[in-house]
Amino acid sequence: MTDAPLHLAVALDGAGWHPAAWRAEDARPGDLFTADYWADLVAEAERGLLDFVTFEDALGLQSAAFHRPDDRTDQVRGSLDAVLLAARLAPLTTHIGLVPTTNVTHTEPFHLAIGIATLDYASRGRAGWRPQISARAADAAHFGRRTTPRLTDDDVRDPERIAARLRPLFDEAADVVEVARRLWDSWEEDAEIRDAATGRFIDRDKVHHIDFEGAYFSVRGPSITPRPPQGQPLVASLAHASAPYEFATRSCDVVFVTPHDRAGAAAILAQVDAAVAAVGRDLRQRPLRRFAELLVFLDEEPGAAERRKAHLDALDGAVLSSDAEIFTGTPHDLADLLLDWRAAGLDGFRLRPGTLPHDLAAITRGLVPELRRRRAFRAAYDATTLREHLGLPYPNSRYAQAG
């Protein structure tokens, strides 16, 4: 095989990505708020040699509507804090990356930076971060400090219209990531001396103020946490339109996109390439990994996944819809699709299991062996950090270089 092996990640969310997943036969709704439930899922993902798992999070209760709360009581509501959950799982795993989602619109950048840095220490270099803006105006009421645009039903039908209305929040998010990266750099590699004989724990000249001044906030620094094991933990974002593409290409190491076929993947990647050029990013110095999203229902028996999804649709009272392509079929058929789409220029895929644990196990025990048979996926972990899994270089501290 001449192509590099695929990268695979899984997006974990509640009982699965179908709203009725908690009512599936093998679901564990009584365990959703226990550490053991999540530990079992991540252990399964690591057995499948996946690159990383992501954990969803938000500042408001889940809703069937993208832009506003609802009053439904027949779907899962409530979640655990994603960063704290990832930190709890870190010592239970050895290789897989852990990528929590955090809101950056209503959370202080300094707090976010030290939280992700701490996760990188807890996981020994396997932390990532998915910064997410707050698209729901109702979230602002939890904090009482500001208001954000209130999206309408017409807005949510047009990704570019949403992006235009929320562009200031994406600009602010870019500043949040820039502050985090500067804080991660603020301690040089050898700033800690730890010499008990001389009484010197740190070299103060190697701990730097970042003195960030932006349109939305100012942060003096330095971080209270020494430079993370990866130098800078991996940053990833989900993008559907021009403003989020620009945010991803300016600020992130991985971008998740949502094509619905191979031609769509090529078209979206062309938009990502245009955003790379617009922000002036040098991909030789700062590579950008590009993952496509798929919501998957998998069964070995042909037709079984379609029947299972139809049953869940009936329980929910509506046919499942998603921003990502919905795949129902066998692991063999999904492997065909992934390798076909890869030819458009994708580096990997983030798969959303329709139900948990069923579709996660189908990925790790059905899809992964099928890809391995085609020499398209790793047979063992060959790296220890998340950046290394994705072939991303270790970033030097900007302050050490300046010195």
Image: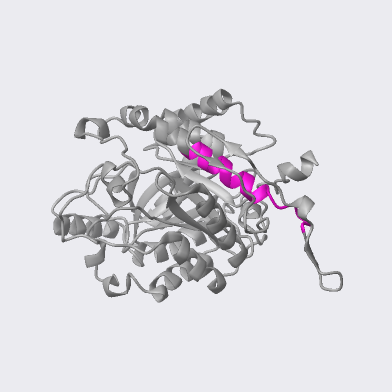
Query: Magenta includes 179?
Result: yes
From the image, give the main secondary structure of the stretch colored magenta: helix
For residue 308, side relative to residue 327 (left or right): left
Query: Magenta includes 209?
Result: no
Q: Is residue 167 above or below residue 104?
A: above
Find the magenta span and give its range. Answer: 173-191
- The residue that appears at 22% across and 66% down in the rendered structure is 23
- The residue that appears at 60% across and 38% down in the rendered structure is 212
Q: Position of residue 345 (x, y in %)?
A: 54, 36
- The residue that appears at 67% across and 52% down in the rendered structure is 231
Q: Position of residue 283 (x, y in %)?
A: 64, 34
Q: Position of residue 403 (x, y in %)?
A: 81, 42
Q: Is residue 271 above or below residue 317?
A: above
Q: Is residue 263 visible?
A: no
Q: Quadrant of residue 94?
A: bottom right
Q: Quadrant of residue 19?
A: bottom left
Q: Position of residue 224 (x, y in %)?
A: 62, 58
Q: Quadrant of residue 24?
A: bottom left
